[in-house]
Image (cartoon, grey):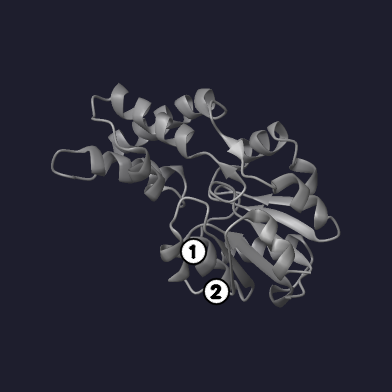
Amino acid sequence: MIQVELMLFDLDGTLIDSKADLARSINLMLEEIGRPRLSEDTIAGFVGDGVRVLVYRSLTASHPEHKPPDDFLHADGIALMHKHYADQMFVETSLYPHIAETLGHFRDKRKAVVTSKEVHFTEIILERFGIREHFDCIIGGDTVPARKPDPQPVREAITRLSGLPPDAVMIGDSENDILAGKRAGAHTCAVTYGFRTEEHMRKTMPDVLITSFDKLKDHFC
């Protein structure tokens, strides 16, 4: 068992299964600008670096010659994505199994969400699913200049939680989460039920690998 005082969680692919709603929002954006749809799995593979990068990758992938968008098209795509996601974010999105009860199990730990999603959307989602009370702070893609895999968001969360990196664990479903945690000096825990495969996450060499959220109880105290 690993003793920790701080628990930092990614959002999409870790706490919530938002793959379908993110994909639908991107495809509505693409449809509006006359681009072909992308598969849900393709779009899911683009998630993890914030909406700007998600839109950029989607516009590039949907171009017949895979050319990246210019600044004007990119800006339009971001605005359309925000518009559609605001309408689509709760069509199919749900908490993964065992989220609420496991967060409750760790009620004595200081906790944060560290996500590339904007704080505004993150707050709405956490409130909607009744788990906002479990978190002492939210570090979003618009909180600090850098985003995961840069360690700055993780370090910011640790600072706001009044802790130290060796006492923290970063939990997430992507290489960005694991790299950010390692670079910040925290423990790392990869989940295999999210947007990346177990094989993919094993390659990131996290301290702990879990197949379901409640398995956190088997590894951390």
x, y percent for residue 35? 24, 29
Element carrying mark 1: loop
As drawn, 74 above or below 9: above
Is residue 168 shown left or right of residue 62?
Answer: right
Q: Quadrant of the C terminus?
A: bottom right
Task: Judge whether residue 69 can be spotted in this image.
Answer: no
At label 1, which amino acid type do we have? Answer: Pro
As drawn, 129 above or below 175: above
Residue at 36%, 35% in the rendered image: 75
Element carrying mark 2: helix
x, y percent for residue 74? 32, 38
Residue at 71%, 65% in the rendered image: 158
Label pair 2/1, CB-CB below 8 angstroms: yes
* Front residue of 193 and 54: 193
Please give the label number shown on residue 183: 2
* N-terminal-most mark, 2 or 1: 1
Q: Residue furthest right?
A: 108
Please give the label number shown on residue 197: none
Q: Residues within 10 Å of mark 1 (few under 14, many from 20)?
A: many
Q: Residue furthest left?
A: 65
Q: Which residue is mark 1?
A: 149
* Front residue of 69 and 167: 167
Residue at 25%, 43% in the rendered image: 60
At label 2, which amino acid type do we have? Answer: Arg
x, y percent for residue 139? 64, 52
x, y percent for residue 95? 63, 40
- Distance from disc 2 to disc 1, alpha carbons, whole Å, reads 8 Å
